[in-house]
Image (tube, rainbow, N blue to C red):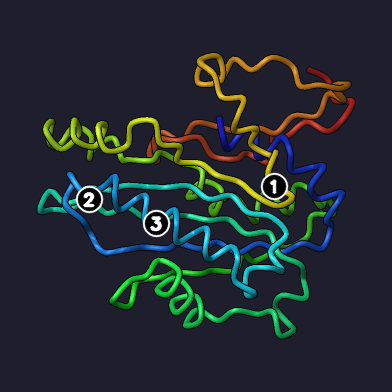
Amino acid sequence: MWQARFYQSLPSLVAAYPKARWIFLTLTVRNCPIDELGATLTAMNAGWQRLKDRKEFRPVLGWIRTTEVTRGQDGSAHPHFHALLMVPPSWFSGPAYVKQARWVELWQSCARLNYTPNVDVRTVKPRARSGEACADVAEALRGAVAETLKYSTKPGDMTADADWFLELTRQTHRRRFVATGGVLRDVLRVEQESDDDLALADGPAAGEDDGSRLAFSWRRDDRRYRREPRADKPAGGDG
């Protein structure tokens, strides 16, 4: 659902910010006991709020941040953030550029950690131009979007240990694992989540339907849907 909503909003984003660039950021903390996961997530969320207030984050035009929790081999929990940042092209050539080492320092400071955390930051590389800006950006973002807007806990982790899974549900009860900000604040329409949404039964979007469609196909080996740009339908295309 989240991926579909993002791709639905992409044409208007590309039109409004044709030169915008994208960064995929992963912020981690050390594993914690599963019964301390709730407190750890609270501390991480506070750290994210401090990070947003840092001068290094100010050039960011918009962001989508999700929380993932994986199960450690010892039964611990490994919570981490995935974030997709939309930045101006000047980010990479001017004083606003933030190197990986600086992201580590920022996250350690903002999350108030007494150790050096693992932080991964990657630039979403533009692909060869096909002549269609939206299709080019969608293809370039495919991997980052799939990694950001995916499950919050791997299905295998849910079934490996019943007690771990039950404690996970207690620790994460009523917590929202998707957040947005800046010009991407309304892209996912987070506040409109419903049972119909979860069934992928959204009603028609507001406004006139121009007939364009973004295609996805089920990849049996990957056990997930992947973008299929070649099957996209342009505006005014036949159904």
Q: Is residue 58 above or below residue 222?
A: below
Element under label 1?
A: loop
Quarter of the image where the N terminus is located? top right
| Lower sequence index among marks 3 and 1 | 3
Residue at which label 3 appears: 44
Residue 77 numbered mark, or none: 2
Density class for disc 2 (Cα within 10 Å; few <14, some 14-19, many ≥20) is many
Q: Contact, CB < 8 Å: mark 3 with mark 1?
A: no
Element under label 3?
A: helix
| Lower sequence index among marks 1 and 2 | 2
Q: Residue at x 68, y 48 (%)?
A: 138
In the image, what residue type sits under mark 3?
Answer: Met
In the image, what residue type sits under mark 1?
Answer: Leu
In the image, what residue type sits under mark 2?
Answer: Ala
Q: Residue at x 59, y 33 (%)?
A: 190
Foreground mark, 2 or 3?
Answer: 3
Residue at which label 1 appears: 184
Density class for disc 3 (Cα within 10 Å; few <14, some 14-19, many ≥20) is many
